[in-house]
Image: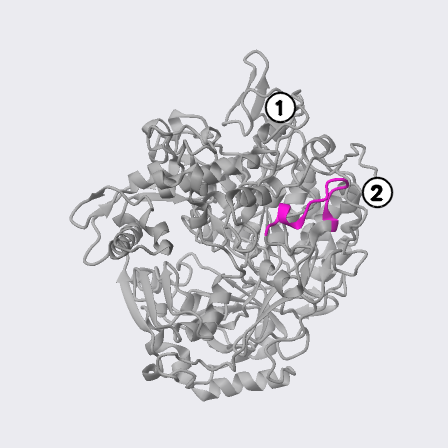
Amino acid sequence: MGTSFGRGGATTFQQDLQNSDCIVIQGSNMAECHPVGFQWVMEAKRRGATVIHVDPRFTRTSALADAHVPLRAGSDIAFLGGLINYVLTNELDFREYVVEYTNAAAIVDQEFQDTEDLDGLFSGFDQESMTYNPLSWAYEGARATAAAGHRDMPKPEAGAAAAEEEAGAGAGEEAGSGGPPVPGKPERDPTLQHPRCVYQILKRHFSRYTPDVVEQICGVPKDQFLQVAHAVTRSSGRDKTTAWVYSVGWTQHTVGVQYIRTAAILQLLLGNIGRPGGGILALRGHASIQGSTDIPTLFNLLPGYIPMPHAHHDETLEEFVESDAGSTGFWGNMRAYAVSLLKAWWGPHATEDNDYCFGYLPRLTGDHGTYRTVLDQIAGKVQGYFVIGENPAVGSSNAKLQRLGLANLEWLVVRDLQMIETATFWQNAPELETGELETERIGTEVFFLPAASHTEKDGTFTNTQRLLQWHHKAVEPAGDRRSDLWFYYHLGRRIRQKLATSTDPRDRPVLELTWQYPTEGDHDEPSADAVLREISGVDADGNPLPGYTQLSDDGSTACGCWIYCGCYADGVNQTARRKPGSEQSWVAPEWAWAWPDNRRIIYNRASADPDGRPWSERKAYVWWDREQGRWTGHDTPDFEATKPPDFEPEPGAHAQHALAGTDAFIMQTDGKAWLYVPTGLLDGPLPTHYEPEESPVDNLLYGQRANPARRLYRHPANPYQPRGGDTFPYVFTTYRLTEHHTAGGMSRFLPYLSELQPEFFCEVSPELAAERDLEHGGWATIVTARTAVEARVLVTERMRPLRVQDRVVHQVGVPYHWGPNGISTGDAGNELLPAVLDPNVNIQESKASTCDVVPGRRPRGPDLQRLVADYRTRAGMSGSTDTATNGATTDSTTTDGAVMNRRTGA
């Protein structure tokens, strides 16, 4: 969403769903996985909204929807592309909105070639490095260098090896709060007739996505597809709005970013962004997943989606800002956001003379994501590892890779609520049973440190709708349990003590950090309130800042995360506000605090027409008050409050001052939402249907089968299955249950939840059960080229066979919560998956793959290896690490697959 709109967060909030005329839930089982927020879907339905659930499985969400549309896992772009084609073919777009608020009128460079011209590839693809050079995607007359839009895109002068390395740092997350910059504003044709304007390119690009093609690719009957198309289009326009809701059912694909891009295009064409009852709601996986990207746990980001500097071309702060900040739009103030961050981290040590300690920041050299790190562990390149709040030994795709990596460390620190499998892999990993690992030969020293739960510590969650909510400590943590804040603070304090007498320049970044936080209680718990104050930002005198527009690039302000600036405005913890809904408006601006600037619907300037009037009274949200000379309404305007609708910028104006009064998408350099992305993505400016890495069918649209820029990791323990064939004929998808949580560390150890969902199971249709002699309640073995797992069989009509390309495709549902530890135990569903990633955000494809299913329990010991080897042979996989790449970014390792332990020589 960042490249489409300018920010990566949800455009709306859950309570606003009650104002929708139609809600499409796709890539999410909202009723079961987000049940509290689902109440607003039911309220919308009570008010007359149409609710549609598009999902491979019939779930509780489907049961409460007006229509359930089953489709083949991995085919969503074809479905959404069909809707786009329907809108464009029938001229059902909200034309005034599209012309004024999107880049539909922008003219694209004549060098650009589409997938329609190159059989599934865009112009600029390099077969050797398997990466794109995006220069030909640019606007006419505004051709950007690769560095401008996406610093880690391959540079024109880069060789194949360098291009692949830089693409590995895939930084699509950088647009999380600031769209990729383009130099200058594009030439435009407001009539939308120019053959190279974005609107016409869209029409040509999606013309293949007819209802018949959607049926052939997705398995959705033409009549049912048209029912969805009619419902969505009749519920969009001046007086009506449609909302789209998704979760990890969309993101966890090799084209996950482009799934979301397709929905963004559709919602923009229909005029549904920035308006009440519209938008795209990204349902996050749990309470603070949004917060973990805002203040990131990602290797390529700094807080607030400021990109991590690159080792090869960010020597100085000026070079860094020049390569990443646009000259127009609010992202043009990136220097102020970056300098304020540096001042928050290094305080008085950060001065203009030393570039505000910019040189202290670490630098990217390529791919440092979790899967690359695991392969480096196996190769003996990583000595130690911290695992905090995660359980990769059963929770990651191809969990075997994770365990092989863990077994080749010198030390491992695990912090969790329970003794999870990542801490006990050395005594109960499946590889011990098969003989691939031996406990006595594993040299990894494991330190397990019990963690405090959210009820045992103060702090904030940042949830699905960008909402920061303070939670108060209810009880003291028992025994040795400690908060994450306590752990990191005291670890840092002890390291600083050990380095106190050091004169080595490399130790200065640690010694000069601002680390003087007040502590309290018997355990010297750092004050979470003080940390939040630092994050919110202060001026030179220590006074709290009211918002991010007050940040300066001269070192006079300090702010730990610019998008959170103002969450402690007026010296009040805004995130702790709890004013009852009955005492305020339905938007509830005094319940907690949402970034940015407490806006609940972002891009809300688009809720008014170009003259500042609401598109309709029924959908009025923010509007221009001529008497007061300012924007007003139900929410904080996502626009400069006193900039009138008829404002035209002066030539050469900078940052927000270069935006016109109709430029509603203020984080984009051109002020427009992007139907077409001229720069900023690694796999193309437009979404294109590609098959998953492992699929039972070929790509019906193009010769290019899968995403050409997807990230493959070649390794003997990570083989990829060939497409089609009879060896792995069934599609499987993973999912979560209401009764368990993620990889199970918070639920499998609890008796009540374990009683509700006691065993690992798989869902199959009656037809598949008959085809494979599977008995309801009996055992099934699910086999892929990685391994085999056993599961109880749930035969249910909720799984429906689909007809795809004139053949019946069966799908298998596999929940992923289990492992050998806890009360409820079982095989881990994620063992089955390959490690193959979306190139933009390095997320794994865990929602669409292929398998075989046979009755009975899986073999034990070496017999399990023999079973998998037999399947590989039958599939024609003669010991190779993967199938033909068909144009994909690959990452190989020089290893024979054995785990070489550096401590024992094993």
Q: Is residue 37 left or right of residue 606?
A: left
Tag in front: 2 or 1: 2
Magenta part, dominant SS = loop
Up/down of 749 relative to 378, above or below:
above
Q: Nearer the viewer, residue 441 or 429?
A: 441
Residue type at numbered disc 1: Pro
Q: Which residues are magenta?
A: 136-151
| Disc 2 and disc 1 in contact, CB within 8 angstroms | no
Q: Nearer the viewer, residue 177 or 350?
A: 350
Q: Residue furthest left?
A: 522
> Residue 425, percent across and down?
36, 74
Q: Is residue 759 left or right of residue 366?
A: left
What's the distance in space between the residues labelled 2 and 1, CA to CA? 32 Å
Q: Residues within 10 Å of mark 1 (few under 14, many from 20)?
A: many
Q: Quadrant of the N terminus?
A: top right
> Residue 287, percent across and down?
40, 48
> Residue 406, percent across and down?
39, 72
> For the point 42% across and 66% down, which residue is it?
392
Q: Is residue 777 visible?
A: no
| Element class at badge 2 | loop
Up/down of 143 relative to 645, above or below:
below
Residue type at numbered disc 2: Pro
Q: Quadrant of the C terminus?
A: bottom left
Q: Which mark is residue 195?
A: 2
Q: Which mark is residue 614?
A: 1
Q: Is residue 453 visible?
A: yes
Q: Is residue 413 left or right of residue 890?
A: left
